[in-house]
Image (cartoon, rainbow, N blue to C red):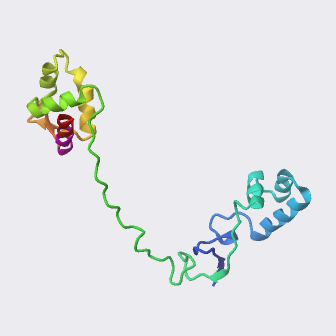
């Protein structure tokens, strides 16, 4: 049975950590050598390690934890009897936050919502009621309103035009716009 070093949270530290490349003895030698040499580069060259690694050892950013050696029960052991604990609060789904109702900020956003509520059910109908000759000028704002959830575009029995309809969020945004 192998002994591993763990910290207060029961996680492996030191040379028993799965990502460790240097032994604890090497780290202690590097710290002792730095007290004499006073240079990260010289210690790194002597130890065969990177200069930044030696710096982190000496500053305590790496290998700065100490802990007891405990017995390992299985490869998934994390310092707790019986292996990794199952925390009841670890995977609980978060409660959905209520989505704030806002008004669309793009140009003509509220006007497009009002037209869709009044019965303009295609891009062409919205463009003609806004006095535009091309439907391309309203395609962008309508697509943005669809992405943000104010309107829904659905296919219409094989026609190339899509039918526009208000969603609940769009109705609430119109109520806010009409009230203000």
Taking the view exactly as shown, the residue that stands out farthest to the top is 133
Q: Is residue 99 left or right of residue 90?
A: left
Which segment is the magenta one? 168-174
Quadrant location, the C terminus: top left
Q: x%, y% of residue 80? A: 54, 80
**Residue at the location (13% across, 32% down)?**
116
Q: Quadrant of residue 119?
A: top left
Quadrant location, the N terminus: bottom right
Taking the view exactly as shown, the residue that stands out farthest to the front is 180
**Residue at the location (66% across, 72% down)?**
16
Q: x%, y% of residue 4? A: 65, 77
What's the magenta bit mostly, secondary-structure-wise?
helix
**Residue at the location (48% across, 77% down)?**
85
52 versus 126 height, above or below:
below
Q: Answer whether residue 162 is visible to the viewer in this image.
A: no
Q: Quadrant of residue 137?
A: top left
Q: Is residue 114 magenta-colored?
A: no
Q: x%, y% of residue 134? A: 20, 17
Q: Answer whether residue 99 is visible to the viewer in this image.
A: yes
**Residue at the location (69% across, 69% down)?**
65
164 versus 93 height, above or below:
above
């Amino acid at each position: 049975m192998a002994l591993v070093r763990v910290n207060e949270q029961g996680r492996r530290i030191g040379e028993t950590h799965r990502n460790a490349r240097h032994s604890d003895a090497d780290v202690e030698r590097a710290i002792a050598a730095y007290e004499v040499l006073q240079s990260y580069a010289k210690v790194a060259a002597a130890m065969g390690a990177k200069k930044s690694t030696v710096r982190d050892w000496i500053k305590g950013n790496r290998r700065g934890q100490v802990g007891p050696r405990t017995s390992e029960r299985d490869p998934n052991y994390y310092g707790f009897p019986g292996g990794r604990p199952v925390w009841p609060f670890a995977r609980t789904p978060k409660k959905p936050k209520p989505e704030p109702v806002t008004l669309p900020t793009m140009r003509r956003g509220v006007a497009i919502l009002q037209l869709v509520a009044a019965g303009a059910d295609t891009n062409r109908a919205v463009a003609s009621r806004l006095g535009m000759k091309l439907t391309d000028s309203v395609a962008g704002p309508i697509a943005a309103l669809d992405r943000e959830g104010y309107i829904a575009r659905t296919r219409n029995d094989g026609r190339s035009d899509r039918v526009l309809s208000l969603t609940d969020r769009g109705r609430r945004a119109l109520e806010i716009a009409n009230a203000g």
